């Protein structure tokens, strides 16, 4: 297949020319490809849970991969994510296993904030097996980007977000609707080239799991894309306060898909969301400044 030959050539080149030695001590052993996939976050790494998923994804981005000089890769084990792996990570911090992850779902437990520019958090949640995972990227300036999973081609995504300028909230379930509205608006307007309108919170309900307090927030909005299309989207978020801030996982789809198909999926994803900060020893996971 021409695409895979091209890719092989690109990979061969990468192993010779990429600065991958900088990443050798990175704890996760997965393949990462700097991506220019339009639906993915700029500068994000696309990491898939299966080799097949990886190849499918690569087929759509081969041209970009072959042409991008800053791409770096590592050897790839077939399965980089999974419920057992996520639960092992949680257990290593003395935390409970993820509960209520539906059959056939994968899961992740990853550190957000390995770079010195952020406060570290342990973020975990389940997601459909065939969704693609993006993790924050690290460079000399610290960490950028976030933890995101998605079936990007269909517009289904779940994205971790740290609400700016919010400190620790003792009881998130006592916050009012305006607080959640502005937190979710901040989250969905992260991508600067998109504009939204008609944002509405339609339901807010408390959710308590593993001694953590969460608020589940249903919302909808109209996305005005850079290409001038209006897309109605619906989603649900789980908002919590861990460490010294406020965090959320928001999941959304095109409204028609939400109604027909994805509502249950998106609810499952955000209900499995756990975020931990205080009292954890992250020192083994943080990136020493000397690495750069
Ligand atoms: C949703 O279901 C209706 C009726 O089954 C169908 O006509 C429509 O095309 C579906 N929409 C999507 C986005 O799948
Ligand atoms: C945190 O873990 C590191 C090893 O990863 C250990 O050296 C250090 O003593 C631990 N710190 C505390 C406060 O337990």
Image (cartoon, grey):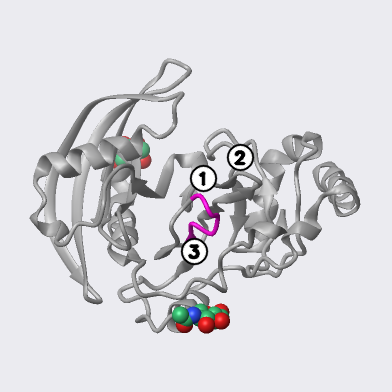
Residue 111: mark: 3
Element class at badge 2:
loop
User: Are the residues at dot 1 and dot 2 in contact (C-beta closer than 8 Å)?
Assistant: yes
Ligand 1 position by quadrant:
top left
Residue 264's tag is none
Q: Is residue 31 magenta?
A: no
Of the image marks 3 and 1, the number of the one nearer the N terminus: 3
Q: Is residue 262 visible?
A: yes
Residue 155 in the image: state x and y as whole percent. Answer: 44, 39
Q: Can you see residue 88? A: no
Calculate the distance from the C-alpha at mark 1 to the C-alpha at mark 2. 7 Å
Where is mark 2, residue-wise?
43
Element carrying mark 1: loop
Q: Position of residue 137 (x, y in %)?
A: 60, 49
Looking at the picture, how far across and down is residue 242, in whole percent? Answer: 30, 62
By secondary structure, the bulk of the magenta-drawn segment is best described as loop
For label 3, the crowd category at 10 Å Cα-Cα, with few meaning under 14, some 14 to 19 and many 20 or more, is many
Q: Which residues are magenta?
A: 112-117
Q: Which mark is residue 145?
A: 1
- Mark 3 or mark 2, earlier in chain: 2
Judged left or right of residue 290, residue 287 is left
């Amino acid at each position: 297949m021409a695409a895979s030959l091209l890719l092989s050539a690109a990979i061969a080149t990468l192993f010779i020319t990429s600065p991958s030695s900088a990443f050798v001590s990175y704890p996760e052993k997965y393949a990462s490809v700097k991506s220019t996939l339009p639906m993915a976050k700029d500068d994000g790494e696309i990491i898939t849970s299966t080799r097949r998923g990886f190849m499918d994804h690569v087929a759509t981005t081969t041209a970009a991969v072959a042409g991008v000089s800053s791409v770096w890769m590592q050897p790839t084990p077939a399965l980089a994510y999974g419920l057992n792996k996520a639960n092992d990570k949680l257990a290593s911090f003395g935390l409970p296993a993820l509960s209520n992850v539906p059959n056939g779902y994968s899961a992740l437990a990853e550190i957000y904030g390995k770079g010195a520019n952020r406060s570290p958090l342990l973020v975990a949640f389940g997601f459909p097996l065939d969704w693609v995972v993006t993790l924050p990227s690290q460079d000399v300036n610290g960490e950028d980007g976030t933890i995101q999973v998605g079936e990007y081609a269909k517009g289904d995504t779940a994205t971790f977000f740290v609400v700016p300028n919010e400190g620790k909230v003792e009881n998130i379930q006592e916050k009012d609707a305006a607080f959640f509205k502005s937190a979710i608006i901040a989250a969905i307007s992260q991508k600067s080239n998109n504009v939204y309108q008609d944002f509405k919170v339609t339901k807010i309900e408390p959710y308590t799991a593993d001694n953590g307090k969460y608020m589940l927030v249903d919302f909808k909005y109209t996305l005005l894309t850079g290409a001038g299309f209006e897309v109605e989207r619906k989603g649900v978020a789980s908002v919590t306060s861990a460490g010294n801030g406020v965090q959320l996982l928001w999941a959304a789809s095109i409204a028609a898909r939400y109604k027909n198909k994805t509502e249950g999926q998106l609810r499952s994803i955000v209900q499995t969301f756990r975020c931990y900060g205080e009292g954890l020893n992250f020192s083994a996971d943080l990136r020493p400044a000397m690495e750069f």
